[in-house]
Image (spheres, rainbow, N blue to C red):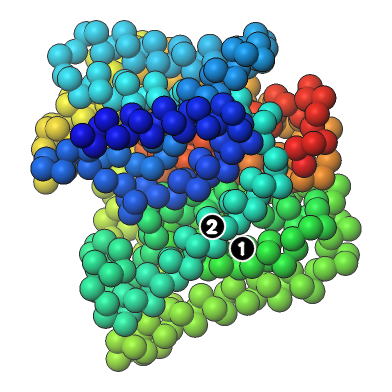
Amino acid sequence: MLSLGLVLIVVLGAGLFYLHPRLMLPALVCTLPFQRLGAFPLDPIRGFPIIQPIQVVGAALIAAALALAVRDKRWRERPLLSIAAALAAVLLCGLVAAAQVHYFQVWRDLVSAVLAVALCLSTGLAVRYTSLRQLWLTLCAVSIVIGLFGLYQFVGDIAGLPLSQTGLLGRYGHLVFGFPRIQATMAEPLFYASFLLIPLFVGASMLLHTQRDRMLGWMVLGVLAINFTLTLSRGAFLAAVVALPVWLWLAKHKLGLALRGHWKRLVLFALGIVLVTTGALAATSAALGKDPLTAPRRFLGLVTTKANETGSLSDRLVAQQQALAVVHERPWFGLGIGGYSFRLEGYPVSRTQNDRVAINNEFLELLVEVGIVGLGSYLIFIMLMLKNAWLASRHATGSRKAWLVGITAAVVATLVQYQSFSGFFIYHIWVLFGLAIGLGLSTAAEPTAESLV
């Protein structure tokens, strides 16, 4: 019965999006952070499979965007076809590998990969029909709500609220680290930090390139910067540090003017984030009856000299070494999307054969699961996407320029963070890629771009 209800929702949603295309991306953005909280099991008895809101809205968007592309003959655009061909090659490698194994889950993961790629391309198609101002306001609203929930999660855990009320997983509570690692509605703090990279870079770009909603922009950046820090996601921290010079380079024409006029405000803002975050950590220690500097010192240590104290770094290195050991078995087309989980039984010991084992390095995981051909196709896709976005950013102005600069920097940050986690089935990343594709392809050729600002 639930399945029929979901099908009905998708069909009605697709019809609504087809009639009102400007609603597609704002509706999709509303679902981006609800990866864990907000998701539900399709079979309540077995508790599996888990359906995320973005999958339901995304399915409706895919159907509507493809129908609109056929109606408007957009599927003939050569740059889009090149990107689609590169992604199709990745999926084809997964198909070739799946045909050689006997695990149902590999075929299931291949179907999930097809849907993720379809969502990416459909997001790119939907950009043409979207008001970028409406999309920005929607992203702000969602980000503030999730950011405030993240802060509630931090305070609630310190106050002793049960996990059922804070939504925090036990392994990220103050009893483990001495302070909570917030994850908001996401499955892991690192996934939450990955999502936050999008509104942080886009928000900074909007403040730099536009004069509208500046108070809202500062509010979003303030709330999310505190959330980003409290995730304690070292991979995301490194990604932000690497992507920041890219953002500065893309925004260089506006940056000099902004620094001359507002450098004091920027310094005060940065100091404020540091003071608030440090104060929150110190308050945690004080509330637990410890020296107020205990939590700040531990936080700093985990980011720097004691990065492997929790064992997560060494676990990742072991997983990657084991993955490298099986690459030679199927070097050209890999073990199949999800196939590594069944090739490497017993790691970690607590997992069953039916659980997906993450290599925690997306590029290495692609090499193992879709081989040299699949990884090469994926890298071609990345290069085409970034090239189009960069070229488009040189000619764009106003809010479109801001979106291109912010999204491009967020893509670079994601590629860096890919070195520390596996994100092929993380939907907000595919939406991010889709936005980069759509903005990159539409800016130079879109005759009605001014109507979308």
Left or right placement of residue 107 versus residue 203 in this view: left
Numbered circle sitting on residue 143: 2
Name which residue lies at 54% across and 78% down.
Answer: 276
SS for tag 2?
Answer: helix
Which image quadrant for residue 79? Answer: top right
Task: Report how far apart the C-alphas of labels 2 and 1 lie in the structure.
Answer: 7 Å
Residue 5, given in percent of the width and then of the height, sits at 30, 35
Name which residue lies at 46% across and 80% down.
Answer: 280
Indicate the quadrant containing the C terminus: top left, top right, bottom left or bottom right: top right
**What is the crowding at mark 1: few (fewer than 14 residues within 10 Å), some, or many (at least 20)?**
many
Residue 400, given in percent of the width and then of the height, sits at 76, 40
Work out whether 128 lies above or below 148. above
Q: Amino acid at mark 2?
A: Ser
Q: On the image, numbered disc 1 is attached to which residue?
A: 220
Which image quadrant for residue 294? Answer: bottom left
SS for tag 1?
Answer: helix
Name which residue lies at 36% across and 89% down.
Answer: 286
Residue 161, given in percent of the width and then of the height, sits at 27, 77
204, 55: nearer the viewer? 55
21, 368: nearer the viewer? 21
N-term mark: 2 or 1: 2
Q: Amino acid at mark 1?
A: Val
Q: Is residue 213 visible?
A: yes
Q: Contact (CB < 8 A) between labels 2 and 1?
A: yes
